[in-house]
């Protein structure tokens, strides 16, 4: 990689410190020179010898190292760095960074170096969700610190949830990806995937949505600096790093969760393929097959965008329109009818749209449109988020 070449890897106290050894190896594979700085607590999990062997440099552990500090070594190290990466970043370290403390070598380097700083949080899920931790993370984000993760999953303490440190290869990939601050400190709610409307205990009405586009949009928004809540229908996809995911099944459940999350949102991106209709009633027992034709009465499902339209204060709202014909006509009609700020429209076919890895979009807004050509949904989502950020920031600055 061309940048950054000189990386200070800060390791704070936590069981995830063992992953940092793999991180050193992967960073060196990309051509980086890595120097490791460990806190006192980190040394209780992994020894400095391990990192010295992997990095090829002595590990710094103290601000009071007489040999290193004879020539103001911490200032020299701060100037040497192209990037400071702290992985794992414990709740304690994040709190000290947020307060601007410099009570050990690692926090001192964060203040003394002009290099950009990234942190990969790792802690128990309740510690991560605590308002104090969230406040500290938001404050660091607002100052330009890049927050990588955390990921969701099983934790060493036995809990399951958001708080795992991202894997080493994911952190390296994130560092190689140009960092955008287009949505820095903006709260984004994304809905994704299909809904399932039950007919009886074993059958339901659904559609072909895989959730891939919505998950890619959520990941791109997080990469652009946003705080992202992903409201997901039933899909088989991994939660994007740094994204808080809420699982739902029916249109009614998605409607309730989105409306609750919208209260604190700046942007809502409606990528979910929500059912337009649902059975009037769900049979308590499995419906048995008979020779007679089966009639299933349906009723309209809750309309999320219509409910948002009626709010006295609503977020910047982006709709999606997956169409099989007259794409532009239907998309523009929905843009006006739902009072959307933008709408992303696509033609559904066997090679793009539902259940595919590629897509193309035409994005419409009042007196404007832009074509995003066919590409992977990951790349497409990045382009879409940048366009949404442009329109959102323009509207915010004009108001």
Image (cartoon, rainbow, N blue to C red):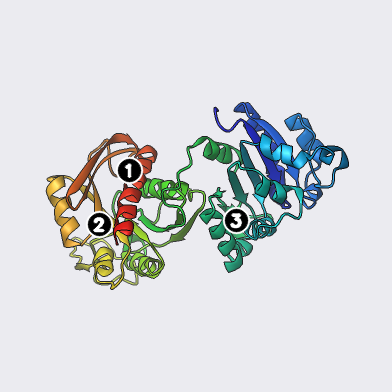
Q: Residue 9 versus residue 390: which sits nearer the camera?
A: 390
Q: Badge 2, how many Cα within 10 Å: few under 14, some, many 20+? A: some
* Residue 293 seen in render: no
Q: Quadrant of residue 255?
A: bottom left
Coordinates of residue 362 in the picture (x, y in percent): 23, 43
Q: Which residue is mark 2?
A: 341
User: On the picture, is 2 further left or further right than 309?
Assistant: right
Which residue lies at the image location 85% right of the left edge and 43% below the top edge? 65
Q: Which residue is mark 3?
A: 163
Can you say whether 364 is above or below 301 in the image? above
Residue most extreme to the front: 71
The kind of secondary structure element at disc 3 is strand
Coordinates of residue 151 in the picture (x, y in percent): 56, 51
Nearer the N terminus, badge 3 or badge 2? 3
Q: Nearer the viewer, mark 2 or mark 1?
A: 2
Q: Which residue is mark 1?
A: 355
* Residue 84 seen in render: yes
Q: Badge 3, how many Cα within 10 Å: few under 14, some, many 20+? A: many
Q: Quadrant of residue 270?
A: bottom left
The kind of secondary structure element at disc 1 is loop
Image disc number at residue 157: none
Q: Residue 131 versus residue 287: which sits nearer the camera?
A: 131
Which residue lies at the image location 28% right of the left edge and 34% below the top edge? 374
Measure how far apart labels 2 and 1 are at the Cα level: 26 Å
Q: Badge 1, how many Cα within 10 Å: few under 14, some, many 20+? A: some
Can you say whether 384 is above or below 201 in the image? above
């Amino acid at each position: 990689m061309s940048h950054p070449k000189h990386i200070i890897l800060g390791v704070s106290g936590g069981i995830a410190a063992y992953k940092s050894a793999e991180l050193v190896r992967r960073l060196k594979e990309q051509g980086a020179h890595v120097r490791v700085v460990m806190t006192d607590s980190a040394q209780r999990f992994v020894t400095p010898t391990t990192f010295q062997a992997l990095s090829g440099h002595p590990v710094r552990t103290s601000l009071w190292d007489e040999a290193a500090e004879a020539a103001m070594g911490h200032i020299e190290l701060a100037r040497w760095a192209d990037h400071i990466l702290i992985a794992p970043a414990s709740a304690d370290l994040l709190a000290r960074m947020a307060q601007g403390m410099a009570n050990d070598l690692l926090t001192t380097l964060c203040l003394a170096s002009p290099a950009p700083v990234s942190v990969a949080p790792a802690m128990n899920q309740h510690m991560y969700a605590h308002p104090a931790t969230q406040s500290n993370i938001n404050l660091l984000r607002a100052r330009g610190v890049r927050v990588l993760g955390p990921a969701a999953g099983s934790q060493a303490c036995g809990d399951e949830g958001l708080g795992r440190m991202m894997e080493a290869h994911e952190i390296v990939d994130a560092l190689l990806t140009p960092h955008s601050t287009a949505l820095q400190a903006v709260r984004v709610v994304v809905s994704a995937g299909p809904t399932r409307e039950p007919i009886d205990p074993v059958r339901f009405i659904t559609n072909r949505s895989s959730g891939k586009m919505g998950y890619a949009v959520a990941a791109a928004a997080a990469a652009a600096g946003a705080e992202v809540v992903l409201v997901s229908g039933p899909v088989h996809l991994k939660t994007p790093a740094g994204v808080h995911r809420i699982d739902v099944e029916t249109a009614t459940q998605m409607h309730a969760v989105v409306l609750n999350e919208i209260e604190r949102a700046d942007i809502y991106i409606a990528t979910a393929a929500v059912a337009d209709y649902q059975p009037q009633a769900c049979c308590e027992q499995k419906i048995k097959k008979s020779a007679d034709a089966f009639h299933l009465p349906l009723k309209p499902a809750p309309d999320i965008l219509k409910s948002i339209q009626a709010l006295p204060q609503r977020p910047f709202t982006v709709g999606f329109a997956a169409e099989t014909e007259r794409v532009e006509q239907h998309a523009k009609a929905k843009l006006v009818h739902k009072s959307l700020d933008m709408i992303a429209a696509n033609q559904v076919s066997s090679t793009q749209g539902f259940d595919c890895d590629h897509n193309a979009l035409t994005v419409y807004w009042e007196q404007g449109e832009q074509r995003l050509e066919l590409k992977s949904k990951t790349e497409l989502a990045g382009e879409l988020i940048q366009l949404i950020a442009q329109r959102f920031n323009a509207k915010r600055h004009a108001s």
